[in-house]
Amino acid sequence: MYLDMHSHSVSSDDSRATVEQYLKWIQVLRKRGNTVDGIVLTEHRKFDAHLDYSSLAEQYNVLVLKGSELDTRFGHFLVYGVTEPLTKELDFADVRMDARELMKAASHHGAFALPAHPGRFGIGLVDYMEQGESFPDVGIVELLNGGSRQGENERASDLCSQHGYLGTGGSDAHLTSHIGTCLTNFEATIATEQDLVEALHSGQFKPVWLQDTQKGAST
């Protein structure tokens, strides 16, 4: 399964794309020979527990899962499998939370938190590790980010090589045509947020570019 693990709809304050616009664009990508099975909406500093995209997902035959992208003192973190107890324990709007505490709380509540765009200059995990911070619970990072500038995904790749981290891929889309730029190829079949958490724990996945999803492409 090919999932875009990082996307923002108009529910995020800096995105102009609706969920339906993303799903319509995925139909265009499919007609061009690409494979995009689903997306994860990782809205900034919040979790939209009240929003239900199941009818849209069924209409367009695209899996739509929900997560969050949280700001921490050590960069941005993507959170998958968000549960109500987790949202009660942590203030998702707190931009000064300790990423290490976030990872521990997520794990405790059956969720999964990992660093977003760790190679991003100025706010990525690479910078904080170079300053001497350590993150013993990190085992997976976002390796391919569709919004990264030149050199940033390369820094994330180097980080993975140095520490043996696994990598995911996500577009970080804020505009309709950016959805699916980068994805994660999972060996498991995923239908729910909990399936996604289990697939991350399995380690059976790899980050890919959109063009890698075409039939005959070598990934």
Image: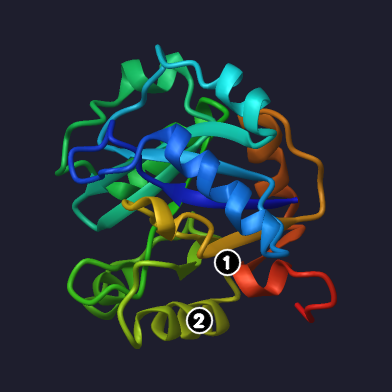
Up/down of 98 relative to 213, above or below:
above
Tell me if residue 209 can be seen: no
Viewport quadrant of the C terminus: bottom right
Residue located at (41% from left, 22% from top): 86
Up/down of 185 relative to 202, above or below:
below
Residue located at (43% from left, 34% from top): 19
Total number of numbered discs in the rendering? 2
Q: Nearer the viewer, residue 140 or 154?
A: 154
Residue beneath label 2, please? 157
Q: Nearer the viewer, residue 158 or 209?
A: 209
- Percent x, y for residue 190? 74, 37
The part of the image, by quadrant, that contains residue 152 is: bottom left
Residue located at (60% from left, 68% from top): 210
For the residue carrying disc 2, how many other residues have a C-alpha within 10 Å: few (<14), some (14-19), or many (20+)?
many
Query: Would you say the residues marked 2 and 1 are in contact, meaning their CB atoms lie under 8 Å apart?
Result: yes
Up/down of 92 relative to 39, above or below:
above
Q: Amino acid at mark 2?
A: Ser
Tell me if residue 124 can be seen: yes
For the residue carrying disc 1, how many other residues have a C-alpha within 10 Å: few (<14), some (14-19), or many (20+)?
many
- Percent x, y for residue 106? 46, 34
Residue beneath label 1, please? 167
Left or right, 189 with reference to 7: right
Mark closer to the chain start, 2 or 1: 2
- Percent x, y for residue 217? 78, 78
Q: Residue furthest right?
A: 216
Q: Amino acid at mark 1?
A: Gly
Left or right, 16 with reference to 173: left
As measured in the structure, the alpha-carbon distance from the residue carrying label 2 to the one carrying label 1 is 8 Å
Residue located at (32% from left, 51% from top): 174
